[in-house]
Image (tube, rainbow, N blue to C red):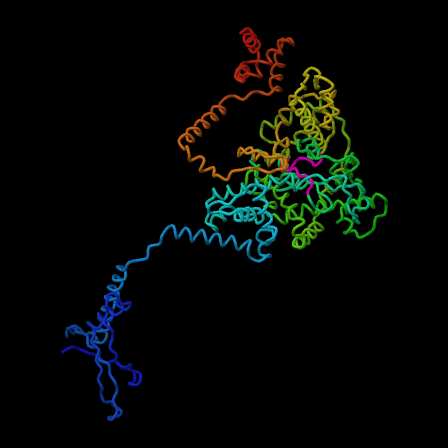
Amino acid sequence: PLPSFAVPAPSPSACPRRQALPSPSASSPLSSAAAVCLAICLCVRVSWSRSPSASSPSSSAAVVRLSVPIAAPPASHHVDPVIYYAFKCRLAVSIMAIIANRYQRRRPRHIVDPEEALERNVEGRKQMLRNLYQGSNIYCYNSLRLTKRSFGDLCAILRVRCGLQDTLNVSVEEKVAIFLLIVGQDTKMRLIQSTYGWSLEPISRHFNEVLRGILSLSHEFIKLPDPAVVLPEDPKWKWFEDCLGALDGTHIDVNVPLADQGRYRNRKQRITTNVLGVCDRHMKFLYVLAGWEGSASDSRILRDAMSREDAFVVPSGKYYLGDAGYSNALGFLTPYRSTRYHLNEWAAQGNNPTTARELYNLRHATARNVVERTFGLLKMRWAILRTSSYFDLETQIRIINACCILHNFLRDRQRDMDDQLMEQVDSEISAAPAENQGEMSMITQKSSRGYVPWNDEMDKVLLDTFVEYFNKGDRCQNGWKPHVYTAAVKNVREKCNVNITKSNIDSRSKTFDKHYHVISSLLSTSGFGWDWEKNKLKVDSDSVWDDYVERNKDAKGYRHKIVKFWDLLSVVYNKDQTNGEAARTAAESSKEMAREIGTSKDPAGSTSTTTSSLKRQRSDDSFNSLWSEKLDMLTATLKDDAPKLPSSVEVLAALQEIEGLDEDTELELYDILTENARKFESMMALPVERRKRWLMKQLRK
């Protein structure tokens, strides 16, 4: 007999009516479920029976009989039959579940087409970008810093005037949106790669393509004003007739190599570039020069801007307003020094001007405040200008110029939306300390400092101390280490019997720095040399001197100036000299990018470019490209190993150490050593007493 155990069943009213089940088939969707049920039924037999109730003989209860066709446990084992059979039932159900799972795995799966998946990814990425510039106007402004109308106008201009075209998978709108995300939100390219499914190479290529197109519009959006145009009345500017605008410098954080950080470190110990900006009354840029080192002064950058090929020109009879960092010269009007000037100084004290100079400074600051508000709006709109970027310095300078072009492009198109940013800009300007307060305080301290006359003996002791500690590596990027000043004060006091302080040493060091900067610039120009006997400059003609002084006002008093110990100055102060070699205007940056891709631009700034990929161009002849790269690497390595040509100052200093050389012989040897670095290196390796005999042999050869 089959063992069985009873389980209480639901009431008869709740029991479902018996219905005929459909026969399972392989094509039926219920075939797998029916197979599982059939397997369970083979192991468990279910039967309905009615048994009389113990409480009421007349009533009966439905009892479900589960009969398991499995042998009963042996009598020798004391195991509860209910637990035993329940375990067997669970085991049977588990086996049937495994069989059903294996059956499901044998069913054919849907194979995804790779091209279809790629098409879906591209379409999804396109839709994400479309949401930026096709959504609401506020969402577009917050994401791209442009309104929908301004975005459409910019894309149309880049298409028509700059030659940007849609590619197979990327439209001009997508390229511009990627560029604005990087510039406006300071979004990293790797984040865009993970978000929109692009690789880094096309992102960088499209970014540079849009950057090149925007820079080509520089002649249209950044240009000097027409002096013949009559400007409308303005309460802030009515006191300054014939004034065209204001100019100032602003510092923008940049990322430069470690060796160049000393030149780019400003007085606040930040690595920045000093950007010259000239704007009109309506907060539009008229001239921008970016790329000068952060340690360069505003006046020096202005002189460079007025002497460049793309020069800043002030019309006759007109002028611009500048702060105390500029000279009060022809074409520029500056405030009175040692007098209250900045607007936050007037707001803090809360009183009216008491003198004519204070009244002039107040009106001057009120009008010149337009350039500070322009720089504030520029940095508030483009987040990439508020922090140091990961781009190289050349690309960062181009981005600064492109942001200024976009600023002028947007100034008349979305003035209402920019009013919200101007509220934040005005609050930050009012809360920020005056930038030139430190300069004015230094002027006051300079007048109260005790004057110490310097002589040749003191200069020699000081320079010897500087050379000693310079060779030990104690010159930092922003000056000397503190113990160097202590040693210099001690040596000058002991050897020269003069009572000096650290401030006197620092002042003299700045004087040496100025001498080296002016004289080294002169010596690097054709027509100038150095007279080692008289310790002053040698000039070919008066016309050469007049032409140079006209371009560089700082060199005016150096023609007959005697500067001793030039060799020591060259050793100590030949580093960390600002030269503005990376400074570029927007037009100059546009020409450089055009030369890089081999295109030509007309004066209006239009360009005819091809949108072919550089990667595809290289793949046409990959074998030749590979060998060309290897050859270039070998040539560069040989150039690095070869000795570098010595400077004229080094050759002259070496020849001066050799006794018994007349002037003609010295000139002949000078020509030989400046043209052949190997011979100069060989001469310097010899002892001093043998150099003359070796040089005579070279002359006889």
Q: Is residue 622 left or right of residue 246?
A: left
Query: In this orientation, which residue lies closer to the viewer: 78 or 146?
Result: 146
Up/down of 135 relative to 620, above or below: below
Q: Quadrant of residue 108?
A: bottom left
Name the outermost residue toward the top. 700
Count of numbered tags: 0
Query: In this orientation, which residue lies closer to the viewer: 273 or 307?
Result: 307
- Residue 185, x across and y down, in percent: 57, 49
Residue at 70% x, 33% y: name it.
306
- Camera sees residue 502: no
- Residue 53, x across and y down, in percent: 25, 89
Residue at 65% x, 41% y: name it.
220
Up/down of 569 relative to 173, above or below: above
Name the outermost residue toward the front. 160
Quadrant the N terminus occupies: bottom left
Q: Is residue 102 left or right of residue 157?
A: left
- Residue 325, x across and y down, in percent: 73, 38
Q: Is residue 254 left or right of residue 419?
A: left
Q: Quadrant of residue 99?
A: bottom left
Magenta residue check for 289: yes
- Camera sees residue 163: yes
- Residue 272, x across and y down, in percent: 62, 40
Name the outermost residue toward the right. 355
Magenta residue check for 539: no
Q: Which residues are magenta?
A: 285-300
